[in-house]
Amino acid sequence: VWRWTAASEHGARMHEAVHILEAATTTNDPAEVYTVTHKALASAITVIARADDSSGIVGDACRRLLALHPRAAAATAVPAGRLIDWMMKFQFEGQVDYFELDPVAYAPALGEKGLAAYRSRLDGVRANLGPEPVGEDRWSSSHRHEWFVLDWNAKRLAVLDRDVDAIIRTHAGDRKVAARFVDTAKALAEIGEIDLAIDWARQAIDIGPWHQSLQAGSYWCELLAAHQPSQLLDARVLLFR
């Protein structure tokens, strides 16, 4: 699959297989669905580590499996300890480092005690890394991947906890680029804090860089269209000007 054409053809077949797996969640034994999904995900990661996935077909199939995996795990009640071991290995020792696991999605499978154990494992990783680098030092750190994974989990766990202050702290960062404001707005919208989400998206328009501000404006209008349509026309005029 190192050739683009072969990788794309293989990716198309992967999507066909994921269709079958997704359909099986309502008809087949949950334990069987989880076992096959788990093995399929491992195989898919092995493939994309070696593939020319310029078209993104293989990556999209991997993401579909990553979305299916926590649902299958919850349906078959996979032991939390075993699931946590896999989650930690996937994130910190995986073949590739461009996919994330969402603890919000895995919360039903982990349960309250499992989530506490997962948080403890993350804390253990953090404690072993030494002082946390700040700013540009993160990019030169020998543990930059570990810090990224920890930051990602902190963001998603803040959403899981529905903690507004934690969401702002973990998503907004230094508040120097519009994208961080949009990230904050999307997380706030995810927990139903719509007014706050609209406010953060609106702020992003004035931050820059310009392409991020344009994306922020689109998201701001999307929120207004869904929740405050009477304000949408004024928002569109502002963006046009």
Image (cartoon, helix red, strand yellow):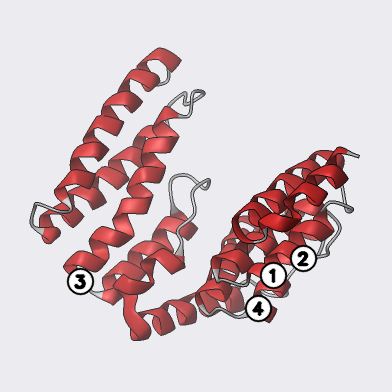
SS assignment at label 1? helix
In screen coordinates, is 57 left or right of 206?
left
- The residue shown at (79%, 41%) is 214
Q: Give x and y (percent) for residue 190.
A: 55, 65
The answer to which of marks 2 and 4 sits earlier in the sequence is 4
Q: Whole-Å distance between the Cαs marked 3 and 1?
A: 37 Å
Q: Are marks 2 and 1 in contact (CB under 8 Å)?
A: yes
Q: Whole-Å distance between the Cαs marked 4 and 1?
A: 12 Å
Q: Which residue is mark 3?
A: 77
Q: Which residue is mark 4?
A: 164
Disc number lying in front (2 or 4): 2
Q: Considering depth in this image, is 92 or 31 the residue closer to the camera?
A: 31
The answer to which of marks 3 and 1 sits earlier in the sequence is 3
Q: Tag count in the figure?
A: 4
SS assignment at label 2? helix
Q: Mark 2 is on which residue type?
A: Asp
Q: In which image quadrant can residue 8 be found?
A: top left
Q: Which residue is mark 2?
A: 199
Indicate which disc residue 195 carries: 1
Q: In which image quadrant can residue 115 be found?
A: bottom left
Q: Considering depth in this image, is 37 or 125 the residue closer to the camera?
A: 37
Residue 10 in sight from this viewpoint:
yes
- The residue shown at (91%, 40%) is 241
